[in-house]
Image (tube, rainbow, N blue to C red):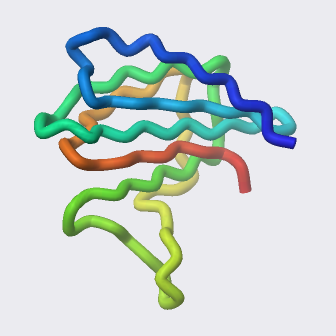
Amino acid sequence: ELLFLLHNRLSTNRKGVYAAAGEYQGKYVFAAVNIGDEDRSLDISLPAALENVSLYVYEEGNRQTNNEGHPVPVQTGLTVDGTYQTILKAQSFILLTNID
């Protein structure tokens, strides 16, 4: 059973950005989508430092897949020390997870 912890702390200047986070057996997943037409800075506060994190990115012209067409991470083995900062490009999606 996946327990979702949804925190919407995005201010009004983040219009078009939606986020969700979940925890399963002590591991985490965070997803954010920017349906707007402008890039947005994103500061993600996580409940703890995470190790062995994979980052998936879906952008126009940047969607890495394996031979079967399934998504693959753009980075693996990341350590996130409680916060993660990134630019969420317009019309894009990111997913951070340490769930195998």
Q: Horizontal and vertical percent for residue 75?
A: 45, 56
Q: Horizontal and vertical percent for residue 53?
A: 59, 46
Q: Is residue 40 above or below residue 27?
A: above
Q: Quadrant of the C terminus?
A: bottom right
Name the image quarter holding residue 13: top left
Q: Horizontal and vertical percent for residue 98?
A: 66, 45
Q: Horizontal and vertical percent for residue 93?
A: 37, 48
Q: Is residue 44 above or below residue 34?
A: above
Residue 45 horizontal side relative to residue 47, left or right: left
Residue found 21% across the figure and 42% down from its top: 89
Residue 37 horizontal side relative to residue 10, left or right: left
Q: Is residue 11 above or below residue 75?
A: above
Q: Point out the residue furthest to the left here.
A: 38
Residue found 16% across the figure and 35% down from its top: 39
Count of all numbered marks drawn on residues in the image: 0
Q: Is residue 73 above or below residue 77?
A: below
Front position in the image: 21 or 28: 21
Front position in the image: 82 or 11: 11
Q: Quadrant of the N terminus?
A: top right
Residue 42 horizontal side relative to residue 6, left or right: left
